[in-house]
Amino acid sequence: MLLIYLVSCINLINHWASSWSLPILSVEKTRLMEIGAQNSSRSYFINNVPLTKVDEVCDLGFTVDKRLKFDLHCKKIVRNANHRLYNLFKSLSTNDPTSIIFSV
C-alpha cells in the first residue's frame, strides 16, 4: 500500500513539473535511498529511467546514510582536516608544535 502511494507521489511530482514546464533535469543524477530496516526490492522510475539505489547520499555538503547517521560525514571532515594539517606541517621548517605556538 505504501509503495503504491510512493510511486503515485513520484508520478504526481513528475506530472506537476511537466505541466509547469519544469522538467526534472537530471534523472540520471537522482538517487534513491531507502530508510529503515525493511528495504524493498522494487525499482522506481522517473520518465521510464530507473532510479539508482544508494546506501548513503551527499546533499548540500552533508553525507547521510540509510540509518540517518552522520558517521560518514564526520569521518570525511576529520580526514579533510588531517590532510590540511599534514600539508601545513609539511610547509613549515619544524614539526614541533611547541616551537610553532611560541613563535607566533
Image (cartoon, rainbow, N blue to C red):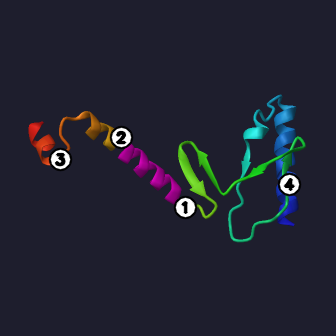
Q: Amino acid at mark 4?
A: Val
Q: Residue 85 lies in what quarter of the image?
A: top left
Which is in the foreground here, disc 3 or disc 4? 3
Mark 3 vs mark 2, CA separation in Å: 15 Å
Residue name at image x 9 percent, y 42 percent: 102
Q: Earlier in the sequence, mark 1 or mark 4?
A: 4
The residue lying at 88 percent from left, 60 percent from top is: 4
* Mark 3 or 4, nearer chain start: 4
Tell me the kind of residue under disc 2: Arg
Span highlighted in magenta in the image = 70-83
Residue at label 4?
7
Quarter placement of the N terminus: bottom right
The residue positioned 86% from the left and 48% from the top of the image is 45
For disc 3, the marked residue is 97
Of tags 1 and 3, the one toward the viewer is 3
Q: As displayed, is residue 17 above or below residue 57? A: above
Q: Is residue 84 left or right of residue 61?
A: left
- Amino acid residing under circle 1: Lys
Question: Which of these two is toward me, 88 or 5?
Answer: 88
Q: In the rendered view of the protein, which quadrant contains the C terminus?
A: top left
